Image: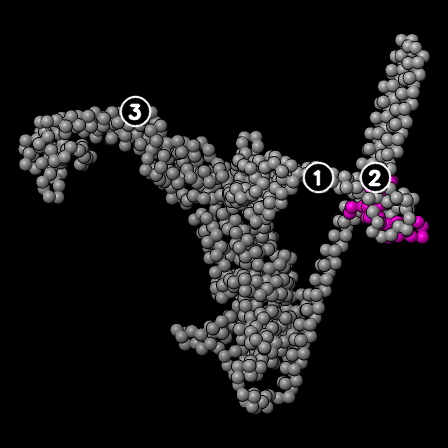
Amino acid sequence: MNEKALKTLEYTKIRDMLTAKALSPMGKEMCAELEPICDIAEITRKQKETTEAVNMALKKGRLPLGGIKDIRRQLERALAGGTLAIDELMAVGEFLYVCRKVKNYSKQENKADVFPVLEKYFELVKPINSVENEITRCILNEQEISDDASSGLRAVRREIRNANGSIRDKLNTIIYSAAYKTMLQDTVITIRNDRYCVPVRAEYQSSFPGMVHDRSNTGSTVFMEPTAVIQLNNKIKELQSREKEEIEKILAELTSLVAENADIIEADMNVIAYLDFVFAKAELSLKMNGSEPKFNTKGIIDIRKGRHPLLDENNVVPIDINLGRTFNTLLITGPNTGGKTVALKTLGLFTLMGQAGLHIPAFDSSELAVFDEVFADIGDEQSIEQSLSTFSAHMTNIVRILDNVTPNSLVLFDELGAGTDPTEGAALAMAIIQLLHKMNVRTAVTTHYSELKVYALSTEGVENACCEFNVETLRPTYKLLIGIPGKSNAFAISKKLGLPDYVIDSAKNFISSENVKFEDVITDLEISKKSVIYEQERAEQYRKEAERLKNEVEAQRTKINEQKEKILADAREKAREVYQQAKEESDRIIKELNKAAREKANQNKLNEKRSELKTKVSDMDELIEKSRRKKVAAVKPIKNLKAGDNVYVVSFDRTGVAMSAPDSNGEVMVQCGNMKIKVPLSELTYYEATKETKKNSSKNVSSKVRAGKSQFIATEIDCRGQNVEEGLGNIDKYLDDAYLAGLTTVTIIHGKGTGVLRAAVQKYLRTNPHVKSFRPGVFGEGEMGVTVVELKNS
């Protein structure tokens, strides 16, 4: 793509926004060099990368690249045989730590989450734990090597500590000695030129045994190294030299490890940089609320509710633009500041962004064409240095475009033919548009010329469009209406601003009647188009509402069927239990009878058992009958049943409310809870709850709610992949249900990720009135990926 189009359409600003999203220096370089490409297969692959990165970021949080540094220079030095400094080795260690984090980030927590494009890159990351661990073991910070880095270093530092202790003991003896008390300025030990000294009064310099290393600013104090500690100071110097040698040896060994694995580290660095670049595209997409567009090689553009990414997202008006399906040339007209140029730039910028693998801020299923070049002539092209007027500068650019354009190019002209005589300018504009139209070049043009509006109306494959303008408020609506030529609205705007009517009337006299009629036709078309659009939007709303109601009815029907099946299943289960009890009781009595017979019990006892059996069987029969016809406090015969009467449905063992009087077939529609059923009148009795029943009902309502909910409430909730707002909303509802269900301990699964969701969940739990306490998970529970919550007693 030509650099001029990239700058004119402000693609470079989008690239700067992308660069700011990258975390690593290498990733930022890739972002800064991103250019649109023309291979549709490669474009599609890069779009899939961005889409998968967006999905991964939403499910797992951002790619963990915190602390990554550019270590290319360190690798070059290591390979060249140099020894890396402590801070350089630390940078390598931190990079290897990032590699390990990235590898762990890619591991799937949910088997349903599949990212086939990005997984190939994550598989290429090869953490080198041995090198990372060795650097971490040996280096404490950017200035200090650990004592445990080597046995030699540990031994030398131990000798240094012993020598320092000895010299301090010797110096303490001197400064607290009565012989030197008057000679010393103060009873302190100081260091000058890396040697231990004491402050001596200047007048005692010759009397105090030792060497002078420094003087105070006033000259009243000299800092002397006592003769008694010169040998010890010399020993410390020697030990410090040995310590430095040991450190150099350790750094050389670590550098050698880095050099041995330089190829793997460099490959990891390239993969990490590319992943950083891909996730920067994902972050930009999330910021712009972007989506993946479809691509074609037929020159068809269909942008749905597109928003220019550089405008304030709270104020920008989404626009629909299409080009290339039934027409290849689009002429956009309308007043100044009405949004014509923004529409033109949106069309060109989306094409460049899409071909660079970036998502576009538009509705899903928007479609873009792949062009080999995008040309744009937009804005003031006046050049003082080249002595070019605005018209000359524009024409120079247009000549260059016409010299390089191909049928697979996208050409954008802003105010084509402006800056010169209107008649000649309109003629030039028409000729240029006609040339591109015959070449089948996809072209979009903004203009004020009425001649071009007429040309579009009379030429097949050329379409008018306008930017809507509200004359009453003198403000543009920024909506693009395709199929309608726009008006400049100069007279209406001037009148609204206070220009006298007689001046406006005089101006109208200078316009031919044909032009006036044409403008009136345009006005009528615009009104009709707006009415059609309004009706289409209303029809779409009604369609969505009907679809929603249909889904609700289907869901309700499914729910009723499920409840009906449950009622029948419960009734069958209860009958089976009653039958089983009767059978078991009969078997028990028969066994006793047989036992009595075997024992030759007297006939009276046998008769007694038989009578008991008969009584038990009768009781079981009565119990079965009771399970079918539930006794209530007051049973009245069915007389004059009307809608609203409380009834008991014998066949379903349920109470309900009559919805209507009996029909001609003697059947009644009854509302039982959420279920409506039609039953014969003979299966109904009157039902009225007694005070005792109501008392028991109200007394046990909470336990029934709790028992009902406890059958369906799980002991854990999974919020992985949700943002903070969505996750907290689900957790809040879940905790209410769990509390009502009487659960005492529940688990919230939020994943490890970046920790943002975990922190938000734990902050919320501190304020929830149902929570008694909470803690992170332990080994076997999910560790930091879960929070275990203890609920208060309900």
CB under 8 Å between discs 1 and 2? no
Residue 412 on image: x %, y %: 56, 69
Question: Vertical placement of 233 versus 608: above or below?
Answer: below
Residue assigned mark 3: 155
- Residue placed at 72% from the left, 55% from the top? 548
* Residue 429 visible in this rendered orientation of the protein: no
Q: Residues within 10 Å of mark 1 (few under 14, many from 20)?
A: few
| Residue at image mark 2 | 632
Q: Amino acid at mark 3?
A: Ala
Q: Is residue 393 left or right of residue 252?
A: right
- Disc 1 target residue: 699
Picture residue at 7% right of the left edge, 34% below the top = 205
Q: Secondary structure at mark 1?
A: helix
**How far apart, in angstroms, are the residues tagged by discs 3 and 1?**
79 Å
The quadrant where residue 529 appears: bottom right
N-term mark: 3 or 2: 3
Residue type pointed to by label 2:
Val
Please tell me which residue lies in front, 719 or 43: 719
**Is any atom of residue 554 visible in this view?**
yes
Residue 159 occupies quadrant: top left
Badge 2: how crowded within 10 Å, few (<14), some, or many (20+)?
some
Contact between marks 3 and 1 (CB within 8 A): the answer is no
Which colouring convention does the figure follow?
A: one colour
Q: Position of residue 65 (x, y in %)?
A: 47, 44
- Do callouts 3 and 2 mark residues in contact (Cβ within 8 Å)? no
Q: Is residue 597 above or below residue 150?
A: above
Nearer the observer, disc 3 or disc 2?
A: 2
The number of discs equals 3
Whole-angstrom CA distance, mark 1 to mark 2, is 18 Å
Q: Give how far apart the Cα atoms at labels 3 and 2 are.
A: 94 Å
Query: Element type at marker 3?
Result: helix
Q: Which residues are magenta?
A: 647-674
